[in-house]
Amino acid sequence: MYLVLIYTQGFAIKQKVNPWKTYVKLSAVLMGSHGLTKGSLAYLNYPAQIMFKSTKVLPVMIMGAFIPGLRRKYPVHEYISAMLLVVGLILLTLADAGTSPNFSVIGILMILAL
């Protein structure tokens, strides 16, 4: 669908950065991530799903800090906010598992898979 819309708007690629195979793989991963996110609603309630989706910034920070080609340095306040996010996630998980009838470890694994 995106390709059709790009074509109808007259957008032309001046120079491709990556081969088409890379774009196809990326779109498959994004499609799988979206499907697992929607499928996890059968096992999690909506607030828990949103909280787990917000933690996807943590692997990005970890990868950015430790991959030799990137070696990004984040300010101290970003590390503090990441730790607070993890603490909030733990507290929500503990509170929600005891009170919500629609909460399962399968849903957590689905939302964290991609």
Image (cartoon, grey):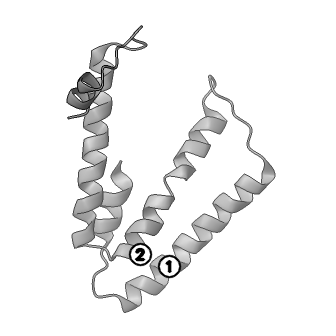
35 shown above or below 31 = below
Under circle 1, the secondary element is: helix
Q: Residue at x 28, y 82 (%)?
A: 102
Q: Residue at x 69, y 34 (%)?
A: 72
38 shown above or below 76 = below
| Residue 31 coordinates in the image, percent (x, y) | 25, 43
69 shown above or below 95 = above
- Report whether 84 appears left or right of 16: right
| Residue 5 coordinates in the image, percent (x, y) | 25, 31
| Residue 7 coordinates in the image, percent (x, y) | 25, 22
| Residue 42 coordinates in the image, percent (x, y) | 21, 71
Tell me if label 1 and label 2 are in contact, CB under 8 Å.
yes
Please identify the quarter of the rendering in which residue 23 is found: top left
Look at mark 1 in the image and give the residue it sits on. Answer: 92
Look at mark 2 in the image and give the residue it sits on. Answer: 47
Q: Inspect the image, locate mark 1, and give the three-letter code of the amino acid beneath it.
A: Leu
Residue 40 marker: none
